[in-house]
Amino acid sequence: MPDVVRVNRDLPWREAAKDADAVRPMLLDQIRHEDFRGRRVVDLGTGEGRLAFVVADLGGHVIGVDLDRVKLMHARAYAGIRDFRNVEFVLGDVEKTPYHEFARDPIDAVVSNLCMSPEIVWHS
């Protein structure tokens, strides 16, 4: 088990996540100035859903997508505790799957924190 933890700590996104702590307040400030009421929003690389919950609080219906089952489990648990009815979480690879496959209805906006690549931009 310690080997798994060590490997996870060495993943490149861990380094990027450290820098994101400085960027996150600016991103959240920008998000809070948007009108998401009634809009369908996909949160790419949602992780535990932090950004998804902010958008949901602003009235958007959010679909959080991530490859990490454990983080999605945490996001779903928090959504249940807070009784969010306008957010759902989907296991998926946003680098390989077109976004419309995650949603039944058209998507109005895409948000993301630390989840961009040429493949992701192409799918958008």
Image (tube, rainbow, N blue to C red):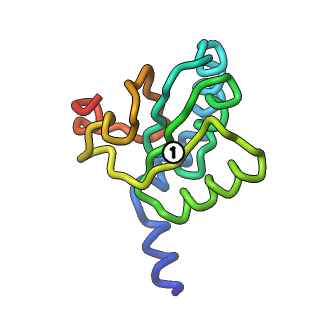
Q: Amino acid at mark 1?
A: Thr
Q: In the shown orientation, is residue 76 left or right of residue 70?
A: right
Which residue corresponds to mark 1? 46
Residue 94 percent coordinates (x, y): 33, 44
Q: Is residue 114 above or below residue 90?
A: above
Q: In the shown orientation, is residue 31 left or right of residue 118?
A: right
Identify which residue, 110 or 38, lies in the foreground.
38
The residue located at (43%, 66%) in the rendering is 10
Residue 124 percent coordinates (x, y): 29, 28
The residue located at (43%, 39%) in the rendering is 44
For this orientation, the residue located farthest to the front is 104
The residue located at (70%, 29%) in the rendering is 57
Q: In the shown orientation, is residue 93 left or right of residue 11?
A: left
SS type, badge 1: loop
The residue located at (46%, 60%) in the rendering is 68
Circle 1 crowding by C-alpha within 10 Å: few under 14, some 14–19, many from 20: many
Which corner quadrant of the image does residue 122 belong to?
A: top left
For this orientation, the residue located farthest to the right is 82
Residue 24 percent coordinates (x, y): 60, 33
Looking at the rendered structure, the number of numbered marks drawn on it comes to 1
Residue 81 percent coordinates (x, y): 77, 52
Q: Is residue 3 above or below residue 17?
A: below
Identify which residue, 21 or 60, lies in the foreground.
60
Identify which residue, 110 or 86, lies in the foreground.
86
Identify which residue, 106 or 25, lies in the foreground.
106
